[in-house]
């Protein structure tokens, strides 16, 4: 008799739990070349010695259009997750991505709509709007549930099972992803600090209020 999907999921979670010794906490700090804190850097931990559990089916992720901006600038999800794109504005948008990891569009997307897509391929999905050129956001799809994003102080804290991982650090303005192998011990004192070189900010500036013609 073919096993049920629930039993298969429980078996995978059991194997994952057995493969790791216990919980560990990693603190990652990211700074720029002048010592400034770097926010919105994505830290990913990919396990090297154990299977990866699937995305939680009850987890809801959304990237809204609000005040003619995306919320938020950088969003991270595990591959296989569903992401909703609610239009919370009073104007239309034209959400799209031409990224290799996922190409899609929501043309003339009306206020109140909340379409969704499944993102099952790892990679960076760059989001734009064909109506409001300054609207820019990044959806980072990763093959693991253990990830974090640096805050305004340049810090991210990730709780994961102890074990060996491939750590990846990415930021929209970095020229290349930083990758290294680390071992997390059952301790709150796991720390890594990175100094990264950032390209110049080249985002399109938003026009002052009242100067966007019929697009507002």
Image: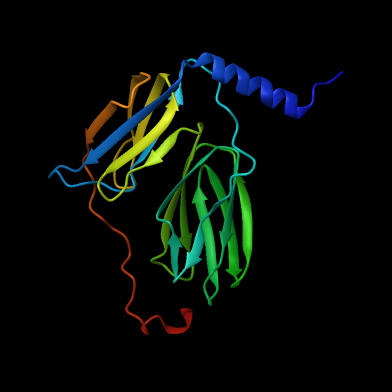
Quadrant for the N terminus in the image: top right
- Report the residue at 59% width, 66% height from top: 107
Q: Examine the image and state in which quarter residue 184 appears.
A: top left
Give the camera-side residue of 161 and 178.
Answer: 161
**Number of dots carrying numbers:** 0
Q: Position of residue 134 (x, y in %)?
A: 38, 66
Residue 110 placement (x, y as % from top left): 60, 72
Which residue occupies 41% across, 67% down? Answer: 133
Quarter residue 179 falls in: top left
Residue placed at 22% from the left, 52% from the top?
200
Coordinates of residue 156 in the picture (x, y in percent)? 33, 40
In screen coordinates, is 117 left or right of 213? right
Where residue 52 appears, as percent x and y from the top left, is 55, 25
In the picture shown, does residue 116 fall above or below 110?
Answer: above
Q: Is residue 81 left or right of residue 159?
A: right
- The front one of 47 and 173 is 47
Question: Residue at coordinates 28% horizontally, 26% vertically from top-left?
Answer: 189
Toward the left, the furthest residue is 34
């Amino acid at each position: 008799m073919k096993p049920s999907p629930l039993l298969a999921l429980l078996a995978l979670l059991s194997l994952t739990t057995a493969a790791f010794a216990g919980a560990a906490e990693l603190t990652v700090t990211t700074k720029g070349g002048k010592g400034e804190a770097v926010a919105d850097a994505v830290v990913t931990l990919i396990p090297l010695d154990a299977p990866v559990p699937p995305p939680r089916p009850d987890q809801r992720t959304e990237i809204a259009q609000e005040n003619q901006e995306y919320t938020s600038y950088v969003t991270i999800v595990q591959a296989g997750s569903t992401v909703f794109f609610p239009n919370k504005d009073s104007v239309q948008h034209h959400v799209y991505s031409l990224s290799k990891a996922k190409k899609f569009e929501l043309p003339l997307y009306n206020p109140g709509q909340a379409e969704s897509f499944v993102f099952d391929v790892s990679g960076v999905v760059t989001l734009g709007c064909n109506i409001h050129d300054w609207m820019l956001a990044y959806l980072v799809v990763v093959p693991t549930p253990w990830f974090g994003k640096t805050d305004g102080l340049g810090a991210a804290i990730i709780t994961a099972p102890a074990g060996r991982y491939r750590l990846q650090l990415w930021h929209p303005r970095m020229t290349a992803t930083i990758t290294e192998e680390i071992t997390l011990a059952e301790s709150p004192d796991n720390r890594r600090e990175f100094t990264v070189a950032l390209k110049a900010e080249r985002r399109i500036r938003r026009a002052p209020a009242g100067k966007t013609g019929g697009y507002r």
